[in-house]
Structure formats: C-alpha cells, structure tokens
Amino acid sequence: MNTPSVPEVVEVEHAAIAAGDQPVIAPMLATLGEPPTGPGWAVEFKWDGYRGIAYCQGGRVRVLSRNQLDLTDRFPELRVLSEVVGGRTVVLDGEIVALGPDRRPSFQLLQRRTRHALGVRALRVAPVAYYVFDVLVVDGRPVWNRPYLERRAVLTALQLPGEHAIQVPPSFPDTEPATILHVAEQHELEGIVSKRVTSRYEPGRRSPAWVKTPLRRTQEVVVGGWKPGQGRRSGTVGSLLLGVYDETGLVYVGHVGTGFTDQALVDMRRRLARLRRSTSPFGTPVPREFARDAQWVEPVLVGEVEFRHWTTDHRLRHPSWRGLRDDLEPADVRHPGP
C-alpha cells in the first residue's frame, strides 16, 4: 500500500501485528484544556475505555492499543468488524468501552473484563463495544490527511451499525463545546473532546487541534514502590508510590491507598513481588515518611488514578486508584504540564 512518508507511521517488516501489509499508525492525541470558544469546532463525547486502532483487511482484523499491544483476542467481539466493513481494507480509530446495565461506558467494568481469562466467562463479565470516531484508511488509501469534516463524511458512508458492538458515536459540529460538556455532565460521562473541523489527523502527535475537557481529573501513573499495609490490610499493600515521566526521568508525584478492591490488592501484591529491587526508581526524592519501609519495584506497571488537582509542588491531591493500564507503556506516562 502506498502511504505518505510520515515519521509516526511505523512500517512493520513482516506485518506481524498489523492486518496484511498495512502500516501501524500511532493515534493522534488531544491536549488538555477548557472548552474552546468561537466557530470551527466539532464536539464529541469523551469515552472511558481503551484507545484502539482497528486494521481490517479481507476477513482479518487486528485491534492495537496505543503501545501496539494486540487487543484482538482479549475482545473477540471486535472481530465482527470484518463483516461490518464488508471485507474492505479499512483502518479505524476509536475507543473500546465496557457497557454497564444503563448502557454507559464503565472503566471499572472494563477492568473486571480484562482480569478474566479469555472465553465465555470473560464475555459474560461485561459486554464491550468499539466506539469508532475516526477513519484513517479506506480501500487501502489514506484519508487521514483530509479535514475532520471530510473524514466524518467518509466514516458515515461506511454505514457502520448503530445498535451493535461496533458503533459511531455522535459528533456535534458548530455547537458550543460548553453546551455539550453540560450534557456530558448530566449523563455522567467522562467529558468532551473538541476538534477543529479543518484539522487533519496527525499520527502520533498530541495536537492543539483536539482539546479534551474531562469532567473528572484522571492521570496515568507508573508504580515505583509500595508501602506494606497495617490493620485490616496487614500482609498486603497499604499504598502505592507513584511517578510520571518528564524530561529528567521518573518523577515522584504522590501515593495512593484508596480505591482498591480486595481482589485488586491480592493481584497487585502478586505482581509487585516479581518486580522487587533494592533502590528507588525515582529520579526525585521521595518524602521520608513514604520512603521509610518502602518496597521499591521496577517501574513497569502503569495504572490510572482519579484525583482532585495538582498541588503547587506537583503532587497529586487526594488520588484514588482506578486500575491498571496494560494498554500503555511506562514511557507513555507523562506529566500533563501547567
């Protein structure tokens, strides 16, 4: 397939993880900000799940995470994409979400789903859907270099089903982003993403042409150590020591001891036992009260927390654990900046 020479489009020598001979495309990322004002924006709801690029060619489907982890076997419902697109060569961008009884995406349900083994039992834990919000390739031809509104028209022309494991969520062009944010809040959704209608898809770039406005503050974090629990948690994890990467390395940003289920604590203790090391992996000092009796680990586990806000000394205020994010690499976890 002939594709533009874009640095973020990674050619795979033997096409081992992409479908057929299609290149792997790094997803475009949004910047954090308040709802933009003025004309020229389209607004979408922000979905609480795993980002996935879907490669469809003939009867083959591969869905890759942001760090190019193959999610196809984990979410076998998504193989229906080959039928939905009629065997065409298509690359789609979207979010894999687990739907609760109220049909709203639930990150907690997605975490439960990923903890279960593959097979019928996993499918019963929580149904998943693939919310497609962009199209990058159609019939082997790239369309990511077209403006947003043109790509949405191409996506609509694919006629993906509405009530199905594969869905195209709505887009609201020429609507005030603040209005859609209010709707998202009423329906307890995660937030919104505002996109310039003239913008092209920029693979692998965190672009100001896409602005995400979450209703809940969340942050991806790297686990660098843990403190033993006391009382009811004696013999297990009391809290995790967290970091994010900046240009200097892994920076300590706080600890989290709430938000864990009993099962999550058991699973975390088992994972941490295999990662023990003798020295702190953080490039910045950890406060003495947390460094004392800390068990240091190799910084390979990525998780997500919900928190109140960043403090003036760049720490997470009142974080609560949401779950592991094995769809991300530690190097992907960056400080959001001012």
Image: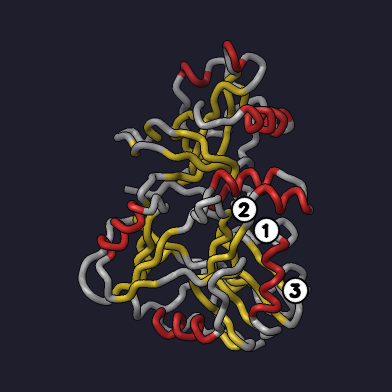
Q: Tell me the SS state at disc 2.
A: loop
Residue wearing tag 1: 69
- Crowding at label 3, few (<14), some or many (≥20) Cα neighbours within 10 Å? few
Q: Earlier in the sequence, mark 3 or mark 2?
A: 3
The amino acid marked with disc number 3 is Ala
The amino acid marked with disc number 2 is Asp
How many numbered discs?
3
- Please say if 272 is above or below 301: above
Residue wearing tag 2: 327
Using the image as rendered, state which of residue 81 and residue 193 is in the foreground: 81
Q: Position of residue 238 (x, y in %)?
A: 56, 21
Which residue is painted at 45% across and 85% down in the image? 153
Using the image as rendered, state which of residue 66 and residue 7 is in the foreground: 66
Q: Earlier in the sequence, mark 2 or mark 1?
A: 1
Residue wearing tag 3: 15
Quadrant of residue 127 in the image? bottom right
The amino acid marked with disc number 1 is Leu
Which residue is painted at 67% across and 16% down in the image? 235
Horizontal arrangement in the rendering, residue 149 relative to residue 11 (left or right): left
Q: Earlier in the sequence, mark 1 or mark 3?
A: 3
- Crowding at label 2, few (<14), some or many (≥20) Cα neighbours within 10 Å? some
View extreme (left): residue: 38
Disc 2 versus disc 1: distance between alpha carbons? 6 Å
Q: Position of residue 167 (x, y in %)?
A: 55, 70
**Dots 1 and 3: beta carbons under 8 Å?**
no
Disc 3 versus disc 2: distance between alpha carbons? 20 Å
